[in-house]
Image: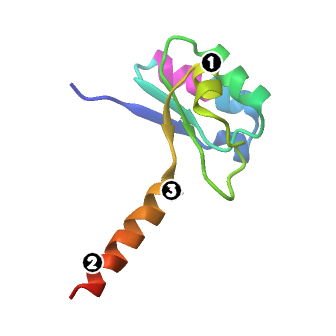
Amino acid sequence: GILIAARSDARAAESLDEAIWRAQAFADEGADILFIDALRSREEMRAFCKAVPNIPKMANMLEGGGRTPLLPLEELEDMGYKIVAYPLSLLGVSVRAMELALLTL
């Protein structure tokens, strides 16, 4: 079936409370995965996980520049996260592979 991933950017634009309220509303409407961007601390990340405990949550570990702290997988899992993205690590590897492929032309 189709999975619905719901994202809120309200933490940066509004407040943590607003972002959590939106995540709860997404869950109430049937979202399968929840993500709040730009959580600023472990405490905020824990608060998000506790607010909607029965829905898988995603953490974005933006290496080298995000507002959300970079945490070990074990700690993220203990908090309640089920999905973790490392977007820049994968991008860097992809770019290097493309460079190597172009060198063979």
Mark earlier in primary sequence (1, 2): 1
Please state if 1 lies on the left or on the right of 48 as rendered. Answer: left
Residue 25 on the magenta segment? yes
Determine which of the numbered discs, if any, sits on residue 89 in the image. Answer: 3
Q: Considering depth in this image, is 11 or 39 the residue closer to the camera?
A: 39
How many other residues sit within 10 Å of disc 3, few (<14), some (14-19) or many (≥20)? few
Q: Is residue 7 magenta?
A: no
From the top left corner, tell me how far across and down residue 28 is, in percent. Answer: 48, 16
Q: Amino acid at mark 1?
A: Asp
* First reached walking from the N terminus: tag 3 or tag 2: 3
Residue at 27% x, 77% y: name it: 101
Q: Which mark is residue 101?
A: 2
Q: CA distance from mark 1 to mark 3?
A: 23 Å
Q: Identify which amino acid the numbered label 3 is placed on.
A: Ser
Q: Which image quarter is the N terminus in?
A: top left
Q: Are marks 3 and 2 in contact (CB under 8 Å)?
A: no
Residue at the image position 67 percent from the left and 37 percent from the top: 71
Badge 1 crowding class, 10 Å Cα cut-off, few under 14, some 14 to 19, many 20 or more, is few
Vertical placement of residue 67 versus 3, above or below? below
Give me the C-alpha separation between circle 1 and circle 2.
Answer: 40 Å
Residue 74 found in image quarter: top right
Residue 55's place in the image compared with 67, above or below, is above
Q: Nearer the viewer, mark 3 or mark 2?
A: 2
Q: Secondary structure at mark 1?
A: helix
Q: Which residue is mark 1?
A: 78
Residue 42 point in image, percent of width and height: 76, 30
Taking 38 as reference, is 105 left or right?
left
* Three-letter amino acid code of the residue under disc 2: Ala
Report the span colored magenta. 22-28
Earlier in the chain: of badge 1 and badge 3, it is 1
